[in-house]
Image (cartoon, helix red, strand yellow):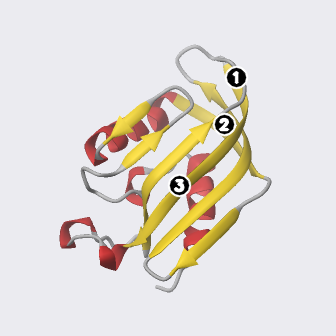
Amino acid sequence: MSEGPETVVRDYYDALRNGDPLEPFFRADESTVKFGISEALFGYDEVSDALREQTETTAEWSVESQNLVVTDRDEVATFADEVTMAWTDTESGERRRFDTRWSGALVRAAEASEADQTDDHEWLFTTMHVSTPDDL
Protein backbone atom coordinates (compact mmCIF):
# COMPACT_ATOMS: atom_id res chain seq x y z
CA MET A 1 0.00 0.00 0.00
CA SER A 2 1.39 3.42 -0.88
CA GLU A 3 -0.75 6.08 0.72
CA GLY A 4 0.59 9.37 1.92
CA PRO A 5 -0.38 11.17 5.10
CA GLU A 6 -2.75 13.53 3.25
CA THR A 7 -4.68 10.52 1.98
CA VAL A 8 -4.97 9.18 5.53
CA VAL A 9 -6.34 12.50 6.80
CA ARG A 10 -8.92 12.57 4.00
CA ASP A 11 -9.75 8.88 4.62
CA TYR A 12 -10.33 9.74 8.29
CA TYR A 13 -12.79 12.45 7.26
CA ASP A 14 -14.56 9.92 5.01
CA ALA A 15 -14.71 7.35 7.83
CA LEU A 16 -16.23 9.99 10.11
CA ARG A 17 -18.85 10.84 7.48
CA ASN A 18 -19.66 7.17 6.89
CA GLY A 19 -19.84 6.10 10.55
CA ASP A 20 -16.89 3.72 10.06
CA PRO A 21 -14.53 2.79 12.92
CA LEU A 22 -12.06 5.59 13.65
CA GLU A 23 -9.70 3.94 16.12
CA PRO A 24 -7.69 2.08 13.41
CA PHE A 25 -6.38 5.49 12.30
CA PHE A 26 -4.55 6.00 15.62
CA ARG A 27 -1.27 4.57 16.88
CA ALA A 28 -1.89 2.00 19.61
CA ASP A 29 0.44 3.57 22.16
CA GLU A 30 0.19 5.26 25.56
CA SER A 31 1.68 8.42 24.03
CA THR A 32 -1.27 8.88 21.63
CA VAL A 33 -3.28 12.00 22.46
CA LYS A 34 -6.52 13.43 21.06
CA PHE A 35 -8.03 16.75 22.06
CA GLY A 36 -11.61 17.19 20.91
CA ILE A 37 -13.96 20.14 21.18
CA SER A 38 -14.85 19.20 24.76
CA GLU A 39 -12.44 16.42 25.73
CA ALA A 40 -8.80 15.57 26.38
CA LEU A 41 -7.88 11.92 25.80
CA PHE A 42 -4.52 10.45 26.78
CA GLY A 43 -3.35 7.05 25.59
CA TYR A 44 -4.72 4.81 22.86
CA ASP A 45 -7.20 3.07 25.17
CA GLU A 46 -8.93 6.35 26.09
CA VAL A 47 -8.85 7.57 22.50
CA SER A 48 -10.26 4.34 21.06
CA ASP A 49 -12.98 4.04 23.73
CA ALA A 50 -14.13 7.62 23.11
CA LEU A 51 -14.09 7.18 19.33
CA ARG A 52 -16.18 4.00 19.55
CA GLU A 53 -18.71 5.77 21.79
CA GLN A 54 -18.80 8.75 19.41
CA THR A 55 -19.50 6.46 16.46
CA GLU A 56 -22.27 4.71 18.39
CA THR A 57 -24.00 7.92 19.54
CA THR A 58 -23.75 10.15 16.46
CA ALA A 59 -25.02 10.03 12.87
CA GLU A 60 -25.42 12.09 9.70
CA TRP A 61 -21.94 13.58 9.78
CA SER A 62 -20.93 16.40 7.49
CA VAL A 63 -17.19 17.10 7.32
CA GLU A 64 -16.04 19.87 4.97
CA SER A 65 -12.30 20.48 4.73
CA GLN A 66 -11.43 24.03 3.75
CA ASN A 67 -7.69 24.44 4.11
CA LEU A 68 -5.83 21.14 4.55
CA VAL A 69 -2.06 21.54 4.80
CA VAL A 70 0.11 18.43 5.20
CA THR A 71 3.87 18.31 5.60
CA ASP A 72 5.54 14.93 5.07
CA ARG A 73 8.98 14.57 6.62
CA ASP A 74 9.61 10.93 5.64
CA GLU A 75 8.75 9.19 8.93
CA VAL A 76 6.63 11.92 10.57
CA ALA A 77 3.97 14.17 9.09
CA THR A 78 2.01 17.12 10.43
CA PHE A 79 -1.36 18.42 9.33
CA ALA A 80 -3.61 21.41 9.91
CA ASP A 81 -7.04 22.21 8.54
CA GLU A 82 -10.12 24.32 8.98
CA VAL A 83 -13.16 22.05 8.97
CA THR A 84 -16.86 22.74 9.15
CA MET A 85 -18.46 19.73 10.76
CA ALA A 86 -21.96 18.79 11.84
CA TRP A 87 -23.63 15.68 13.24
CA THR A 88 -26.79 14.48 14.90
CA ASP A 89 -26.68 13.25 18.50
CA THR A 90 -28.63 9.99 18.25
CA GLU A 91 -29.59 10.05 21.94
CA SER A 92 -31.08 13.57 22.04
CA GLY A 93 -31.82 14.09 18.34
CA GLU A 94 -30.00 17.42 18.53
CA ARG A 95 -28.10 18.60 15.45
CA ARG A 96 -24.70 20.16 16.24
CA ARG A 97 -22.51 22.23 13.94
CA PHE A 98 -19.09 23.78 14.48
CA ASP A 99 -16.44 25.62 12.52
CA THR A 100 -13.28 23.90 13.77
CA ARG A 101 -9.52 23.93 13.56
CA TRP A 102 -7.67 20.63 13.31
CA SER A 103 -3.97 19.88 13.74
CA GLY A 104 -1.80 16.95 14.62
CA ALA A 105 0.96 14.53 13.76
CA LEU A 106 1.16 11.14 12.10
CA VAL A 107 3.94 8.55 11.99
CA ARG A 108 4.59 5.80 9.52
CA ALA A 109 3.15 2.54 10.80
CA ALA A 110 6.58 0.96 10.19
CA GLU A 111 7.96 3.36 12.82
CA ALA A 112 5.36 2.23 15.33
CA SER A 113 5.98 -0.86 17.42
CA GLU A 114 5.10 -4.26 15.97
CA ALA A 115 1.87 -4.31 18.01
CA ASP A 116 0.78 -0.98 16.48
CA GLN A 117 1.17 -2.02 12.89
CA THR A 118 -1.96 -2.78 10.95
CA ASP A 119 -2.72 -3.53 7.35
CA ASP A 120 -5.24 -0.68 7.35
CA HIS A 121 -3.02 2.41 7.12
CA GLU A 122 0.57 3.23 6.29
CA TRP A 123 0.33 6.33 8.52
CA LEU A 124 -1.19 6.56 12.03
CA PHE A 125 -2.22 9.60 14.06
CA THR A 126 -0.17 10.11 17.23
CA THR A 127 -1.75 13.43 18.11
CA MET A 128 -4.92 15.15 16.98
CA HIS A 129 -6.29 18.46 18.19
CA VAL A 130 -9.76 19.68 17.23
CA SER A 131 -10.88 23.02 18.60
CA THR A 132 -13.43 25.70 17.88
CA PRO A 133 -13.43 29.45 18.44
CA ASP A 134 -17.06 29.13 19.53
CA ASP A 135 -18.28 28.79 23.10
CA LEU A 136 -19.98 25.49 23.84
Left or right: residue 46 compared with residue 53: left
The residue sitting at the top extreme is: 92
Residue wearing tag 2: 60
Q: Quadrant of residue 111?
A: bottom left
Asked if marks 3 and 2 touch (Cβ < 8 Å), the reply is no
Asked if marks 1 and 2 touch (Cβ < 8 Å), the reply is yes
Q: Nearer the viewer, mark 3 or mark 1?
A: 3
For the residue marked with disc 1, what is the amino acid? Arg
Residue wearing tag 1: 95
Point out the tag, 1 or 2, that comes first from the N-terminus.
Answer: 2
Local packing at callout 2 (Cα closer than 10 Å; few below 14, some 14-19, many 20+) is: some
Residue 47, horizontal then vertical, whole percent: 36, 42
Local packing at callout 3 (Cα closer than 10 Å; few below 14, some 14-19, many 20+) is: some
Residue 65, horizontal then vertical, whole percent: 75, 53
Indicate the secondary structure of the residue bearing disc 3.
strand
For the residue marked with disc 2, what is the amino acid? Glu
Dot label at residue 104:
3
Asked if marks 3 and 1 touch (Cβ < 8 Å), the reply is no
Point out the tag, 3 or 2, that comes first from the N-terminus.
Answer: 2
For the residue marked with disc 3, what is the amino acid? Gly
Residue positioned 64% across, 17% down in the render: 136
Distance between the Cα atoms at labels 1 and 2? 9 Å
Residue positioned 53% across, 44% down in the render: 129
Dot label at residue 25:
none
Residue in the foreground of this view, choosing between 49 and 67: 67
